[in-house]
């Protein structure tokens, strides 16, 4: 899946997609801080991005199990 496809997916309705939107926002912030040599902030937001996308993945799996 490309980054653009992730952005399109994030724009869908549903609480689970809010986690993906937050993840993409944190990823963008990590890139901005990395480019500015702000290592602590870049690391923090990169970790937050991974945490949010992990929560998104878990919510999608749970929803998928509910609708089987």
Image (tube, grey):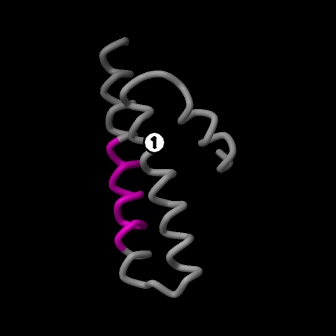
Residue 33 screen position, x and y as percent:
50, 76
Q: Range of the magenta residues?
A: 44-55
Farthest residue, direction bottom: 37
Image quadrant of residue 51? bottom left
Q: Is residue 54 magenta?
A: yes
> Quadrant of the image for the N terminus?
top right
Question: Which residue is more in the foreground, 27 or 59?
Answer: 27
Q: Nearer the viewer, residue 20 or 59?
A: 20
**Residue 38 among those drawn in magenta:** no
Residue under label 1, please give it.
20
Residue at 45% across / 42% down in the picture? 20
Judged from the image, the secondary structure of the residue bearing numbered disc 1 is: helix
Asked if 4 appears above or below 16 in the picture, the reply is below
Residue 49 location in percent, x, y? 41, 57
Question: Quadrant of the rendered structure where residue 14 is?
Answer: top left
Question: Is the residue 17 above or below the residue 35 in the image?
Answer: above
Q: Main secondary structure of the magenta part?
A: helix
Which quarter of the rendered picture does the C terminus lie within?
A: top left
Circle 1 residues within 10 Å: few <14, some 14–19, many ≥20: many
Residue drawn at (49%, 53%) of the image: 25
| Residue 38 quadrant | bottom left
Q: In this image, 7 relative to 26: left or right?
A: right
User: Residue at left 40%, top 66%?
Assistant: 45
- The x, y position of residue 2, in whole percent, is 68, 48
| Residue 41 drawn at (x, y percent) | 39, 76
**Image side of residue 66 versus residue 30, left or right:** left
């Amino acid at each position: 899946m490309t980054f653009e496809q992730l952005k399109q997916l994030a724009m869908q309705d549903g609480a689970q997609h809010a986690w993906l939107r937050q993840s993409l926002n944190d990823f963008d912030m990590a890139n901005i801080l990395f480019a500015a040599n702000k290592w602590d902030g870049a690391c923090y937001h990169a970790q937050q991005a991974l945490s949010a996308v992990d929560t998104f993945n878990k919510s999608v799996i749970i929803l998928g199990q509910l609708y089987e």
